[in-house]
Image (cartoon, rainbow, N blue to C red):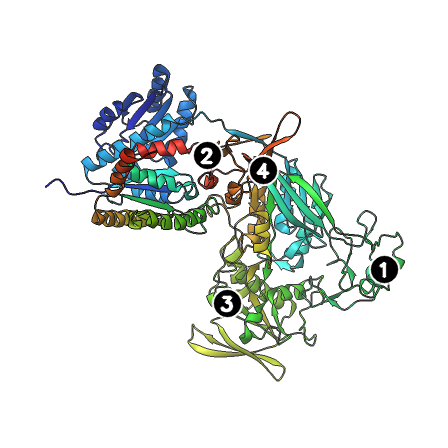
Amino acid sequence: MAKIGVFVCHCGENIASMVDTGKLVTTISEHPGVAFSSEYKYFCSDPGQETVKKAIRENNLTGVVVAACSPRMHEQTFRKACAEAGLNPYMLELANIREQCSWVHTDKIQATDKAIEITRSLVEKVKRNNNLQPISVPVTRRAMVIGGGVAGIQAALDIASAGREVILVEREPSIGGHMAQLSETFPTLDCSQCILTPRMVEAVQHPNITVMTYSEVEEVDGYIGNFTVKVRQKARYVKMETCTGCGDCIQKCPVKKIPSDFECGLGNRTAIYTPFAQAVPNVPVIDRDRCTYFKNGKCKICQKTCQIDSIDFEQQDRMVSLEVGAIVVATGFQVQNTALYGEYGYGRYKDVITGLHFERLASASGPTAGKILRPSDGKEPETIVFLQCAGSRDAAKGVKYCSKICCMYTAKHAMLYAHKVHHGKTRIFYMDIRAAGKGYDEFTRRAIEEDQAGYIRGRVSKLYEENGKLIVRGVDTLLGKPVEVEADMVVLATAMIPQPDAKEFAKRIGIGYDEYGFYNEAHLKLRPVETATAGIYLAGACQSPKDIPDSVAQASAAAAKVLGLFSKEQLEREPVVASVSDSTCAGCWGCVIACPYNAIDRRDITDRNGNLIKRVASVNPGLCQGCGTCVSFCRSNSIDLAGFTEKQIFAEVMGL
Amino acid sequence: MSEPFEPKIVAFVCTYCTYAGADLAGTSRMKYAPNVRIVRLPCTGRISPMFILKALQKGADGVLVSGCHPGDCHFAQGNYHARRRWTVFRALLSFTGIPEERIKFSWISAAEGAKFAELINGITDEIRALGPFEQYQELQKVIETQSTY
């Protein structure tokens, strides 16, 4: 026999001023099954909770309804009180008579009636509540970091340094990401490679980190604490185990004129190559599509050159299955190709380049060894025009957002150019200078005041070539006059965009993304590094445009989340999960189709001798998130959701 | 003349969006008609058409189903399932003679307290104009007294 206790809270005056709590208590005390009822000014207070606990113990209550505020406010508080009084914490319901009654109504009689109905329906529900136990799932305390840029490296190092194993997966032949391509970094102007390469080496040498380069994540299965990830290790055609990275093969390779992606096409590479000299691991790969041997069946010069027989043309892609407990996604970004902007002449004029090209020109390890030279004729440009927001903040081109880093790197480019070409002139067309960040505004001021960066507020409408000069036509909106600049080179600060396959990849691993393809966090402010999929975290520019400090900070935050998850061997979860009644399940698999989490599998029921009796649906409580979609899908009523069972809901409706 | 008719409306809402939206209307002290009784569920995907029929059987004059906006479902797809189910159920409703106008479907996010208050006022007026839903109970009586089963 149910013995329900009802506790009506006044919430000071918040409830009591609009709801006749005395009437509520007397009415509900006559309701069948109600064994105890009382009212109090603040049940959430310490003495209030003591009253609840005492009533549970003295009256051997089997269920509790607290008529007070929203369950979103104090459900946990009263669950804890119930547990402390020896009652299962899931034998509690909160009747929301504050947010959804006293605060929104103006007629005391109507509000009181409503409060009575709300409370009564939840008494009916709680009578049918079941004792539930939190679900424990084991945690594999090994993490995977997808993407080996600065964010991925940082996350991997942080997790590994705390003593947990990490698998760092990178699809390019080397880790390093975009940061390896940069020349100097704002606002300190320290050389990017000088700060990054030691971290790359540290990652690859760390005893807790396994670096898998030239590898791609194909499939993610499982759930928080228990993921199975399938990774394709692409064939390098060079043996990782024996190659010493001497580079003889690269020097002898006859195919030398392949535009290098790493150099943004400003330099060339061979068919057997490492993307850059400081690559980690320093083991080349053979570009199958360009290699003469793979094309014509003849050559093998690299194999003949290699003194330790490390070239293996027979290598195949390998699929590896890995068990991990958490995943950090740090897949980074791409730079928008401004082919969209016919008016800026990108692709038509060789000397119209993107910011990333300029980084390579300014980099000491770049194709020009750090000299700023025009791609067209190799001459030193006398005047450079920079166009900011070339792509960003332009709804017409599909990028409504601010790419965040361009203002800063353009100021940096202007400074680097001024330091290298003393008589050089810069003109920067900008919309706003967005320099929020530690030392950032000071940096842009320095570019203007010390390095004579010439800022022009306005947009460029046309760019064309005349007598070997690039004519940039725009408007100075501060003077309200058209301007025309003769430039030798034009640098477009193009937008940061998601990786081209970002959406497809998100679907493969089961995380959300926004309209552009940047990955969605669980909550923009309060859960910025978690995804809606438990156990998968975000770091770096795959979430939104970010500079290096932000990426690194987020990577460390993601690592902290992973380590928090790994701090226990078992994971406790709310027991609001679905379960199947084996005796009635007809095996129609409607629930399997309905489940958004792939949490429902087919399970065989066999007799003692192993003969199949029937095949039924079976819910994996680790994967189930408790939405209940399967329950209303089930044709035979064989599946139910703990905490929101059919019986409970029907009783709740009938109690109204 | 007895007192004017006040409809009784049962709302089935998801806890992540509409329930939170209703809470927000409360914390913002927006005033709306007291005719709605809310049943909280984890997701609109959990809402079975049987719940709606049960509410009508119990004497509701109208039913509201409300959840997260398309694309915003906490459970990724629950609201799409709810929408599809509703489309099919609506066809069944008109077939059985239950007027569709008695049942409302809407999306209210956790940030839309004002929209929630407006919605409740709106549907309360609409259902009030339709008058009490007596056919269902009458039919129920017929079934109970004349059924041969």
Asked whether disc 4 touches disc 3, contact meaning CB atoms under 8 Å apart, the reply is no
> Is the Cβ of the residue at disc 2 closer than 8 Å to that at disc 3?
no
Q: Which mark is residue A397?
A: 3
Judging from the image, what secondary structure is the residue with disc 2 in?
Answer: strand
User: Identity of the amino acid at label 4?
Assistant: Arg
In the picture of the structure, the residue carrying the numbered disc 4 is A602
Q: Nearer the N terminus, badge 2 or badge 3?
A: 3
Pointers 1 and 2 in contact (CB under 8 A)?
no
Q: Is residue B81 left or right of residue A32?
A: right
Q: Is residue A274 visible?
A: yes
Residue A335, relative to residue A649: is it above or below? below
Residue toward you, A612 or B110: A612
Report if the CB atoms under discs 1 and 4 are less than 8 Å apart.
no
Q: Which of the labelled discs sits on residue A638, or is there none?
A: none
Q: Residue at x 35, y 17 (%)?
A: A54
**Kind of residue indicated by mark 1:** Cys
Select label 1 or label 2 by which is in front: 2
Type of amino acid under label 2:
Leu
Q: Which residue is mark 1?
A: A302
Q: Is residue A331 left or right of residue A573?
A: right
Q: Nearer the viewer, mark 4 or mark 2?
A: 4
Instruction: Have a look at marks 3 and 1 and say if they share a chain.
Output: yes
| Mark 4 chain | A
Image quarter of the N terminus of chain A: top left
**Same chain for marks 1 and 4?**
yes
Q: Which residue is mark 2?
A: A641
